[in-house]
Image (spheres, rainbow, N blue to C red):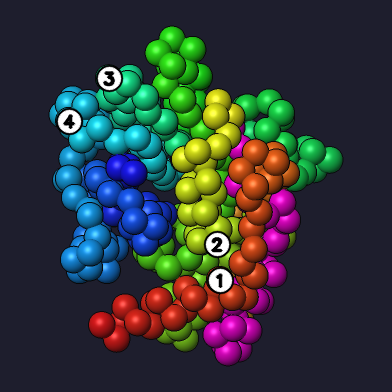
């Protein structure tokens, strides 16, 4: 099967590309390298048995529509995005330009094909706003009330997916992702607390916890997320599906587990809580279990250990 992955040089995208190639698919990778890197695709590009073509292209470009029509993918995994909530607050027009217009370019390309499916990376952490504690883990039926421009742009993209399905028979499945972590996540960005903590623990520096550390997140390993994407290539048509563990983990507990795995006794440093940060978050994954036959399986300590190994290997290399 021929597939396309937008944002395929990024953290989640490159891990997805590796899985798709391992399963024997022909893969077109689209990425403008604004945040992704070719280093993330090193193993994919080095194997001569893989059928992979890299296209350095901005998803907002009209050329994307033409490329999709020319390459004829059966499935488009749309992961390219402006994914920083803080950037979306400072530059909401830019955020909407990338996340909404970029999605429309993908959909315009998809509707030029006789049949195509779009598997969309939605944001479970922002889509539902700030649910009441009694509603956790939150279900897909919970009202979509994003509180940031980033969340609004992702919600708008889902609305366009629904419209194109009705108007042009472009099938879709939208995966509302929890807090994804794993190898290749950037430890120098604003997002990715596991990667940030890992980098500091390996250098013997104290990690910084904002607030009292009792805020919770639903941390899910990237391989589990990739498996959900692959399953959504043929299942879950017309649905928004949560991809998470359904379990809340406090930042303090995360720090404790990571320090234990790293063998570090350096105590964390606490700083004032950042404005706009959600207090609690967790996604109910039961619907994905029903429609995709999917569930998360990677233990937190096992996933954290792989992050440490990846950072060590990157340094050694």
Q: Nearer the viewer, mark 4 or mark 1?
A: 4
- Earlier in the chain: of badge 1 and badge 2, it is 2
Closer-to-camera residue (110/264):
110
Residue identifier under label 3 = 112
* Quadrant of residue 94 within the rendered picture: top left
Secondary structure of the residue carrying numbered label 2: strand
Q: Which residue is mark 1?
A: 303
Q: Is 206 one of the magenta-colored residues?
A: no
Distance between mark 4 and mark 1 Cα atoms: 39 Å
Q: Which mark is residue 221?
A: 2
How many C-alpha atoms fall within 10 Å of the one at disc 2: few (<14), some, or many (≥20)?
many
Q: Quote the CA–CA distance across marks 1 and 2.
A: 6 Å
Residue 275 located left or right of residue 164: right
Residue at 26% across, 63% down: 44
Looking at the image, tell me whether mark 3 or mark 1 is earlier in sequence order: 3
Which portion, as a residue range, is magenta? 240-266
Residue 144 point in image, percent of width and height: 63, 27
Q: Are marks 1 and 2 in contact (CB under 8 Å)?
A: yes
């Amino acid at each position: 099967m021929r597939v396309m992955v937008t944002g395929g040089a990024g953290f989640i995208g490159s891990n997805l590309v590796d899985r798709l190639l391992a399963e024997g698919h022909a893969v077109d990778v689209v990425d403008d390298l604004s945040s992704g890197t070719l280093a993330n695709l090193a193993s994919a590009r080095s194997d001569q048995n893989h059928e992979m073509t890299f296209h350095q292209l901005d998803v907002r470009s009209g050329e994307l529509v033409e490329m999709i029509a020319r390459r004829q993918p059966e499935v488009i995994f749309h992961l390219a995005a402006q994914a920083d909530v803080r950037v979306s607050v400072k530059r909401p027009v830019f955020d909407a330009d990338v996340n909404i217009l970029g999605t429309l370019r993908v959909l315009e390309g998809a509707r030029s094909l006789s049949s195509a499916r779009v598997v969309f990376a939605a944001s479970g952490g922002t889509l539902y706003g700030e649910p009441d504690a009694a509603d956790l883990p939150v279900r897909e039926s919970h009202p979509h009330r994003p509180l940031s421009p980033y969340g609004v742009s992702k919600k708008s993209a889902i609305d366009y997916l629904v419209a194109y399905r009705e108007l042009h028979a472009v099938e879709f499945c939208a995966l509302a992702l929890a807090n994804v972590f794993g190898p290749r996540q950037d430890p120098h960005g604003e997002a990715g607390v596991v990667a940030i903590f890992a980098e500091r623990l390996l250098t013997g520096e104290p990690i910084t916890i904002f607030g009292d550390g009792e805020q919770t997140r639903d941390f899910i390993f990237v391989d589990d997320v990739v498996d959900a994407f692959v399953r959504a290539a043929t299942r879950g048509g017309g649905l928004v599906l949560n991809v998470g563990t359904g379990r809340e983990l406090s930042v303090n507990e995360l720090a404790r587990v990571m320090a234990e795995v790293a063998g570090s006794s350096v105590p964390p440093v606490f700083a004032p809580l950042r404005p706009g940060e959600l207090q609690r978050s967790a996604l109910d994954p039961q619907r994905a279990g029903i429609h995709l036959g999917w569930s998360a399986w990677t233990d937190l300590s096992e996933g954290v250990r792989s992050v440490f190994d990846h950072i060590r290997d990157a340094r050694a290399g």
